[in-house]
Amino acid sequence: QVQLVESGGGLVQAGGSLRLSCAVSGNRFSIHAMGWYRQADGKQRELVARITSGGSTTYADSVKDRFAISRDNAKNTVYLQMNSLRPEDTAVYYCNADIGLSRYWGQGTQVTVSS
């Protein structure tokens, strides 16, 4: 079955950087778009960044010019480079992948930014 495994979360001071990775395995079909969402305590899950199979990207306004999404199609992996982190970036970060007609999600990785 399809599995998405995230890594790279942790605790960082404000202004610091983290790089999240999400590796997809078990897929029999091509991966279309891939993305990162986040959910802070008491808030709804929101889109952070998304990247199509062709490399087109979309970002939430709150992370533009600070975060960068990329993907390695040979490794079925999507990355999220997060720079200039702020306390308000604290959340559980989830990756997803559109494969065939379905969307699959990872288990989430905690990112905590201290002030």
Image (cartoon, rainbow, N blue to C red):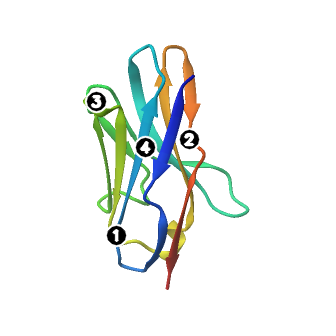
Label 1 – label 3 distance at C-alpha: 24 Å
Q: Which residue is mark 4?
A: 22
Describe the element under mark 4 as helix, strand or loop.
Answer: strand
Tag 2–tag 4 contact (CB < 8 Å) = yes
Place of residue 95 in the rendered image (x, y in percent of width and height, measured from the top left):
50, 43
* Within-10-Å neighbours for mark 4: few <14, some 14–19, many 20+: many
Circle 2 crowding by C-alpha within 10 Å: few under 14, some 14–19, many from 20? some
The local crowd at label 3, few if under 14, some if 14 to 19, many if 20 or more residues have their Cα within 10 Å, is few
Q: Is residue 32 above or below residue 105?
A: above
Cα–Cα gap, marks 1 and 4: 17 Å
Q: Position of residue 81 (x, y in %)?
A: 32, 57
Question: Identity of the amino acid at label 1?
Answer: Ser
Q: Which residue is mark 3?
A: 73
Identify the residue position indicated by label 2 in the image.
Answer: 106
Question: Which of the two discs, 2 and 1, sits closer to the camera?
Answer: 2
Residue 92 is left or right of residue 26, and the answer is: right
Query: Which amino acid, by three-letter code, is at mark 2?
Result: Gly
Q: Is residue 114 above or below residue 1?
A: below
Q: Amino acid at mark 4?
A: Cys
Query: Mark 2 and mark 4: span between their CA atoms?
Result: 8 Å
Q: Quadrant of residue 66?
A: bottom left
- Picture disc at residue 17: 1
Q: Residue at x 53, y 32 (%)?
A: 3
Q: Is residue 68 left or right of residue 33?
A: left
Q: Nearer the viewer, mark 1 or mark 4?
A: 4
